[in-house]
Image (cartoon, rainbow, N blue to C red):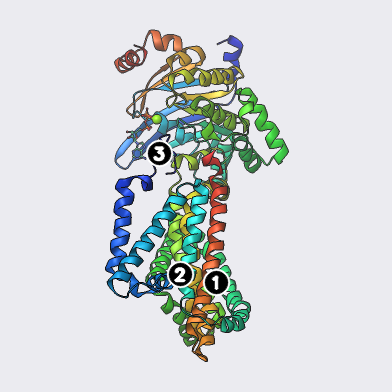
Amino acid sequence: MTSAHAAAVKAALPAIEISGLNKWYGNLQVLHDVNLSVAQGERMVICGPSGSGKSTLIRTVNALEGFQDGEIKVAGIRLTRDQAVVEEIRRRVGMVFQQFNLFPHLTVLENCALPLRLVRGLSPAEARARAMHYLSKVRIPEQATKYPAQLSGGQQQRVAIARAVAMQPEVMLFDEPTSALDPEMVKEVLDVMVALADEGMTMAVVTHEMGFARQVADRVIFMDAGRIIEQGPPSTFFSAPKSDRTRAFLQQVLH
Amino acid sequence: MHYKDNIDYPPMLTRPVVFVPLLSAIFAGLWWFQSGDGAFGRLVRGLAPVAEGNPLNLVTAACVTALVGFNIFVVMRLPLRQQVWLVWGELAALILLFFYSFDLSFAFIQRKIGFLITQGLLTTLYISAASIAIATVLALMGAIAKLSSNGIAQGIAHFYTSLFRGLPLLMQIYMIYLGLPQLGYVVDAVPTGIAALSLCYGAYMTEIFRAGIESIPRGQWEAARALGMRPVAVMTRIILPQSMRVIIPPTGNQFISMLKDSSLVSVVGVWELMYLARTQGQTEFRHIEMMVTASLIYWLMSIVLELLQKRIETHFNKAATR
Ligand SMILES: Nc1ncnc2c1ncn2[C@@H]1O[C@H](COP(=O)(O)OP(=O)(O)OP(=O)(O)O)[C@@H](O)[C@H]1O
Ligand SMILES: [Mg+2]
């Protein structure tokens, strides 16, 4: 992290600000008093064992999950259950899922262009042009007329990234974007994410790809049982983890 | 056999273990039921003098079995599509021959068919088309209501499907035609028919639509919402187009079935196809002529719906089959 970048990170309004967040599924508390602030331009990686609440946490940010207690702000806007507020926040936050969730009845190009028309109000021609631009950035413009089922997993995930980024969000959320991929396709997706980070996109990434965390992250968060246990820059997080649980987890994923 | 395997199985019907028992069963069945007494027997006697009774039964059964065997032998040598069409055509010819054997008066049919079509068929088509359109809208609303988080909407939708799937269609027609006037609202016969058919089929189709919508994985909703799409856009652009693959085949069934159930509205005096078929034949005791004619018209309309269903299915399967 360059010092200029660090200064820019400090100066602006946080992209995401979460305070005192608690969430229950029935009697099961899955988030315990989570406090977390993601600065503009910051790249944050969230890791932790299965069931620790990583997905739940990032999915509360764009209201795919509700919560009972606490506060979430995106670019200064406080998330409520109001439709206008939620839609405003969803327009500012892009999301990439583990299972890609491309629309199977639309071609790759339509997958990217349809939301641009419906949500951003672009004309069909503008939407197609912008969609093609972002498909080129993830290096699959030649697949534009194909249907998702005709693509490999890695290609599908890159389309999903292009679809989300084409909306020009302020923040991108990734929920284990490479976990459903065959090993040889992980790199092509991570490369696209690294390129996105290099352009200064604010990113919150749930992943077990510790190489990616080392290379890209400004900060690594470790969660366990619904709590943030430890956080820090990758240099100290990986070399000198403070908590036993973090150490145990890192031993498993790094082996 | 949706996914073609890459094995050349010997066709079933060319295997002796299949065709020997099959032809034996046909032969035995024909013999057992004394086919010589009926039309086949008459046919055989027309070709050669065979004594009545057992010899005739034997010869008839043997002839028909041989004919079936020869037919299989020929058909098996054709390419798949031609096999399908040829068999379809042969069966259709048999059914028509069956009707022909009723000794129908074609002069009478010729005299009446014009009216049957201009009055009966048009009324049936009009009632069915209007009902199909309204039922589709009702079904969509019913399904969305059932899946909504609005208690009032859910309550109405559940009651609606329960009542209109539960009551006999005939009763629904009477309720509207004879019951509503009790409240001071008189409904004409044709609107009654359309209302009853729409409500009844809308109730069945509500369940089809609901199941179709529910068949779409949660991730599709989440992706569309995360992109900021509005509820109506999520439904019409993402969910429904995908549900169509599940919705259309059973809906096609419903439409074909509705076409024929539209004949029930004749009880309130609508001059639709079935009503005319029954009344036109009465004066000259030519019931069968009119019934056969009406039946064939219904069948033709069903075939048109079948073809339409097939086209729409192909359209919505586009992405899946590529
Ligand atoms: N819809 C739900 N209903 C009830 N419990 C749920 C639901 N979704 C998640 N949970 C529970 O919430 C907890 C946190 O789940 P979450 O999916 O956020 O974990 P995660 O850290 O993303 O795990 P993974 O690495 O397996 O994806 C788990 O105990 C899970 O069983
Ligand atoms: Mg998860």
Disc 2 crowd, CA 10 A, few/some/many (<14, 14-19, 20+): many
Q: How many marks?
A: 3
List the single residue furthest toward the front. B49
Q: Residue at x 45, y 34 (%)?
A: A59
Whether residue B167 can be seen here: no
Mark 1, ligand 1, within 8 Å: the answer is: no
Q: Residue at x 55, y 41 (%)?
A: B319
The span from disc 2 to disc 3 (Cα, nearest Å) is: 47 Å
Disc 1 crowd, CA 10 A, few/some/many (<14, 14-19, 20+): some
Q: Nearer the viewer, residue B287 or B107?
A: B107
Question: What's the mark number on residue B200?
Answer: 2
Q: Quadrant of residue B60?
A: bottom left
Judge whether B183 appears above or below A169 on screen. Answer: below
Relative side of B117 to A54, left or right: right
Question: What's the mark number on residue A69?
Answer: 3
Residues behind callouts 1 and 3 on a single chain: no
Disc 3 crowd, CA 10 A, few/some/many (<14, 14-19, 20+): some
The span from disc 1 to disc 3 (Cα, nearest Å) is: 66 Å
Whether residue A28 can be seen here: yes
- Find residue B91 and report its horizontal and vertical position in percent: 46, 62
Name the residue beneath numbered marker 1: B297
Relative side of A149 to B72, left or right: right
Report the quarter where the N terminus of chain B lies.
top left
- Find residue B22 and report its horizontal and vertical position in percent: 32, 54
CB within 8 Å, label 2 to label 3: no
Nearest to viewer (mark 1 / mark 3): 1
Of the residues shown, which amino acid type is indicated by label 2? Cys
Of the residues shown, which amino acid type is indicated by label 3? Asp
Chain identifier of the residue bearing label 1 in the image: B
Q: Nearer the viewer, residue B211 or B296?
A: B296
